[in-house]
Amino acid sequence: MKAAETKPFKAALEAMRARLRGDVSTMADAALGKTRADASGDISRMPIHMADLGTDAYEQELTLSLMANEEGTLEMVEQALDRIRNKTFGICEECSGVIAKKRLEAIPFAALCIRCAEKFEQGPSRPRQPR
């Protein structure tokens, strides 16, 4: 892909990276920062009800899970920006074929063409067991 063709993808990836970095930072603060008691100004560390403790733990676990997801996407965005710098953006990492422009417009950090992505999602094919 020519350098001029990669400009809009680079801009989109950089904007995505900035948003994801902000999201991850905000989620980290939420998950590891203030508790409900801190937010309400309560000086006691004990929740008013035991169910609140479970809710807080669930919310923290959910936030940490979402944060890990966002970090994974951020890593794929960084790799796509590296591919732009290395002039390999738009080339499938599996088969070295061209990744369709429509696919890159939908998922600018895509590293695989649609055919290789489908194979990857299906997982390793298993031989049929004899009866």
Image: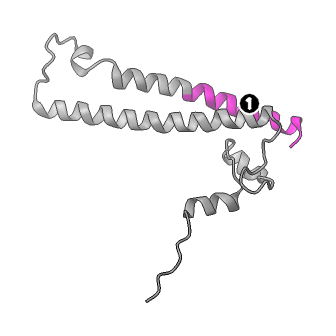
- Front-most of 16 and 98? 98
Question: Quarter of the image containing the N terminus?
Answer: top right
On the rendered structure, is 57 left or right of 86?
Answer: left
> Is 32 one of the magenta-colored residues?
no
Check the image and report above or below for 39 versus 66: above
Dominant secondary-structure state across the stretch colored magenta: helix
On the rendered structure, is 130 left or right of 86?
Answer: left
Q: Which residues are magenta?
A: 1-20
Give the residue displayed 25% in from the left and 33% down from the top.
57
Q: Which residue is mark 1?
A: 11
How many numbered marks are there?
A: 1
Q: Amino acid at mark 1?
A: Ala
Local SS, label 1: helix
What colour scheme has been applied to the protein in the rendered image? one colour
On the rendered structure, is 64 left or right of 82?
Answer: left
Tell me which corner region of the image, top left, top right, bottom left or bottom right, holds residue 16: top right
Residue 45 position, x and y percent, is: 16, 16
Give the residue displayed 69% in from the left and 62% down from the top.
115
Give the residue displayed 40% in from the left and 38% down from the top.
65
